Amino acid sequence: MNTMNNEKKMGVDSASSTPTFWQKTRQFLYTTLNAMTFGIFGTIVVGAIVQTLGLVIGIEVFNRVSQILTSLLGMGIGLSIGLSLKLNGLKLVMISVAGGIASLLKVDFTLPGWYVPGASSNNPITVYLVVIAVYFLIELVFKKKTVYDLFFIPLLASLGAVLAVYVVSWPIDRLMELIYATIKFFMTAEPYSTSAFISLIFGILLTLPFISSAGVAIAVFTTPFLQGDPIAITAMCAAVVGCTAQMIGFSVQTVRKNDVGTIFTVGLASSMFQFKNVMKKPMTWVPTLVASFVLAPVAYLLFDGYQWFINAIPDNHAFTAAWPGMGSSGLVGQLQTLTISGFSFQGWLFVAYQIMAPLILVLFLDVLFIKMSWYKDTDLILDATL
């Protein structure tokens, strides 16, 4: 009895039935950030695939469809987050609209009205923050249904989204610029080790289930990529090597004790399916991490600093910056590499390297680690609950 009383005084629920504030916050972030990935994939990533298909088979309307899908990024993120938070009806509609406002309104405090007419932001991090802000606003104000909801929910959600964009977009844009400036500084100073770390970081982001590596790539690289900055393109090539290494690497490790469908799911959908096993046995992540870290600087050396790739990118292009953060998910990284390079011979070699290099290296490390008893082949079995 005394022990129970002491636990209550310390704020500990002995039955662990009531989650703490921090547990609720962690679960909320996990749920919403994971949902954001679905919104990104269903819009801008699919748009990149459609754009590539249009170029390959010569259907010009696909390029327009790709532009439409890209413009729907904010609404896609808003809808996926709303569904993950169990919203329905008008609240779900307006949380999607808030995401659309966040992606289509580009703020610039030096211009009249503090926005750029006709320009889009499409920064998924800004969209996420605006959607979450509008969600809490709606939940706070409209706790109970009233006859006025049909009028006031859309009005408040729209105005709240606009206000949130003006509050969060400027610091987020400056933060992305700072991150890229840091990347550019180190890439200019020493491209080999910087490529290794960019590759490793994006590979880690890809495998983590609560953040979108594609979203980070879009946020950090979109502006310099559209401007044709060669340093940005070099960094993006490093990122696609790191992300692909994770997916192909985990697919190789998944070969043991898993069926063919599961193997292809990991290699072509997401390496995050193995994250549950990584949490149980962290050593299972080491082979793919080594591959991400090692293969990017080797690629930089073998492919002459990607100068051929940089030269192939046309001026005023409409390619998105999602592909380096996608890896082999939907083969977006590889399809966009080929498309941007004009399906050149070097482009095909680079794609072959992205796939074959991690396959060989991770296979070697996997066999070695199992032989050294650092982990077992059964540690990477995927169960049906994934």
Image (spheres, rainbow, N blue to C red):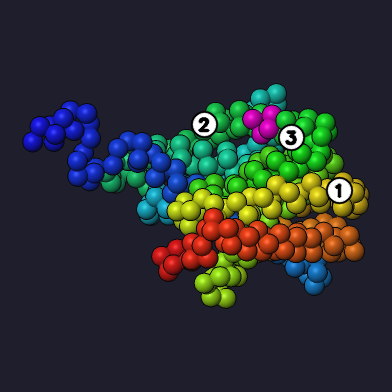
- The amino acid pointed to by label 3 is Ile
Instruction: Work out whether residue 194 or residue 175 is closer to the camera in this orientation and state it.
Output: 194
Instruction: Work out whether residue 254 or residue 236 is closer to the camera in this orientation and state it.
Output: 254
Mark 1 neighbour class, 10 Å CA radius: few under 14, some 14 to 19, many 20 or more: few
The residue positioned farthest toward the bottom in the image shown: 260
Q: Which residue is mark 3?
A: 183
**Which numbered circle lies on residue 163?**
2
- What residue lies at 46% left-to-right and 40% top-to-bottom? 132
- What residue lies at 51% left-to-right and 33% top-to-bottom? 164
Quadrant in which the N terminus appears? top left
Kindly report the secondary structure that dominates the magenta region of the rendered protein.
helix
Left or right, 106 with respect to 59, comes to left
Instruction: Work out whether residue 15 or residue 58 is closer to the camera in this orientation and state it.
Output: 15
Is residue 48 on the magenta stretch? no
Span of residues in magenta: 175-179
Question: Which of labels 2 and 1 is toward the front?
Answer: 1
Going from N to C along the chain, the mark reached first, 2 or 1, is 2
Question: Which of labels 3 and 1 is toward the front?
Answer: 1
Quadrant in which the C terminus appears? bottom left
Question: How far across and down, in percent of the image, does residue 111 sit?
Answer: 70, 26
Left or right, 377 with respect to 354, comes to left
Q: Is residue 293 in sight in this rendering?
A: yes
Element class at badge 3 = helix
The residue positioned farthest toward the left in the image shown: 1
Mark 2 neighbour class, 10 Å CA radius: few under 14, some 14 to 19, many 20 or more: some
Q: Which residue is mark 1?
A: 301
Dividing the picture into quarters, in which one does residue 363 lie? bottom right
Q: Is residue 27 above or below residue 45?
A: above
- What residue lies at 35% left-to-right and 40% top-to-bottom? 23
Mark 3 neighbour class, 10 Å CA radius: few under 14, some 14 to 19, many 20 or more: many
